Image (tube, rainbow, N blue to C red):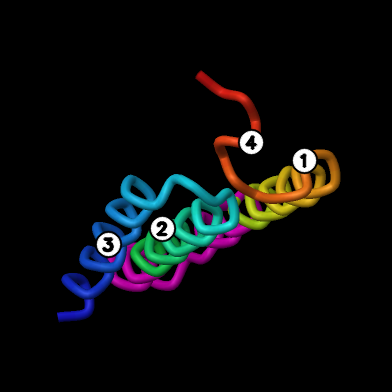
Amino acid sequence: MNLALFYYMFIFSVFSFIFIRKHLLLCLLSLEFMVLSLLFLIMLYCLMFFSMNFYLYVFMMTFYVCEGVLGLGVLVSMIRFHGNDYMNSLFLW
């Protein structure tokens, strides 16, 4: 039951990332939701198969925190230089 819940969380976060592309903040939130579901899946598998070995969990959590900080830094610099977080304000093709 719990495993299916985390799979649904991941699939809904992927769909929200695909369909909501206008704001950078919403893209970052859907990416963090995706990362959170993957982190829960890793924790569940670590508890089930590796008998409470959390080294992989801490290692992945470190990378996810760095990814979140990098995304917030990009968001802040984009708002400072462009005035908003719309993706079409970057003049992308």
Residue 49 percent location from the top left of the image: 29, 64
- Looking at the rendering, the stretch of residues picked out in magenta corresponds to 43-63
Contact? badges 2 and 1 (CB < 8 Å): no
Contact? badges 3 and 1 (CB < 8 Å): no
- For marks 1 and 4, give the CA distance: 7 Å
Residue 39 percent location from the top left of the image: 44, 63
Q: Residue at label 1? A: 82
Q: Residue at label 2? A: 34
Marking on residue 89: 4
- For marks 3 and 4, give the CA distance: 27 Å
Disc 3 versus disc 1: nearer the observer: 1
Residue 56 percent location from the top left of the image: 51, 55
Label 2 sits on a secondary structure element that is helix
Contact? badges 3 and 4 (CB < 8 Å): no
Label 3 crowding class (10 Å Cα cut-off): few <14, some 14-19, many 20+?
some
| For residue 91, side relative to residue 4 (left or right) | right
Disc 2 versus disc 3: nearer the observer: 3
- For marks 3 and 1, give the CA distance: 30 Å
Q: Residue at label 3? A: 12
Label 2 crowding class (10 Å Cα cut-off): few <14, some 14-19, many 20+?
many
Say which amino acid is labelled 2: Met
Whether residue 88 appears in this view of the structure is: yes
| For residue 77, side relative to residue 10 (left or right) | right
Contact? badges 1 and 4 (CB < 8 Å): yes
Q: Residue at x 34, y 64 (%)?
A: 41
Label 1 sits on a secondary structure element that is helix
Q: Residue at x 21, y 71 (%)?
A: 3
Disc on the earlier residue, 3 or 4: 3
Label 3 sits on a secondary structure element that is helix
